[in-house]
Amino acid sequence: MSKNIIALAGPPCSGKSTVGKILSLSLQADFVDIDHLIQHERGHTIEWMFGHEGEEAFRALEKKILAEVIFHATGRTVIALGGGTLLDSDSRKLIESKTILFTLFTSPDTLTERNNGHRPLAGDPAMLKNLVRQREKHYSSLSRQITTENRTPEKVAELVRREALPLLSPQDLPS
């Protein structure tokens, strides 16, 4: 079954948003960053939401917004998921059934080099490495693994694009 939505999963700092923007341009697709939508809807940063409302409230909003994005997509769309979005089994089922899922990964050292410290569960290198270690089985269970290690975001976007093109709905192929 062909689809018109590509979802990018992976740990924090794996390149989902950066690659997603580039990929959406090359595919003439809409780009949606789930974390940015959440921040826009709530009017607060994710860090603030985790600190003041808790992870459970954040995850509930994340799940709601993800479903809205999936069900309201009208054409080619690239979605950058949050690092923990697919820990929710309903969200994972939705993504796996309605999108072409790619999982970006890289070494823990590279992730910590990219970390700007603004991650609610991975604010410093030790926290990020611990988070990745805790979620290692989860991330490795997701489909279409692509490493971002020693690759430019443009190269990663091109690798995703090449693999996704045969899976996209024919009416949604870029001209």
Image: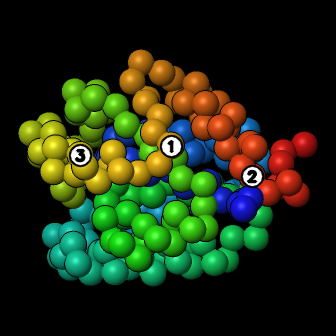
Q: Nearer the viewer, residue 155 or 86?
A: 86
The reply to whether the C-beta atoms of the residues labelled 2 and 3 are less than 8 Å apart is no
Residue 155 % position (x, y): 58, 25
What residue appears at the point 22 percent right and 27 percent down from the top-left corner? 109
- Most distant residue in the top direction: 150
- Most distant residue in the left direction: 126
Q: Secondary structure at mark 2?
A: loop
| Disc 2 residue type (three-letter) | Leu
Left or right of residue 104: residue 138: left
Residue 30 % position (x, y): 69, 57
Can residue 54 be seen from the camera position used here? yes
Residue assigned mark 2:
168
| Disc 1 residue type (three-letter) | Arg
The quadrant of the rendering that contains the N terminus is bottom right
What residue appears at the point 28 percent right and 34 percent down from the top-left corner? 111
Numbered marks: total: 3
Residue assigned mark 3:
136
Residue assigned mark 1:
144
What residue appears at the point 74 percent right and 59 percent down from the top-left corner? 2
Q: Quadrant of residue 70?
A: bottom right
Q: CA distance from mark 2 to mark 3?
A: 29 Å
Q: Tell which circle, 1 or 2, labels the residue nearer the N-terminal end.
A: 1
Left or right of residue 91: residue 56: left
Can residue 123 be seen from the camera position used here? no
Q: CA distance from mark 1 to mark 2?
A: 15 Å
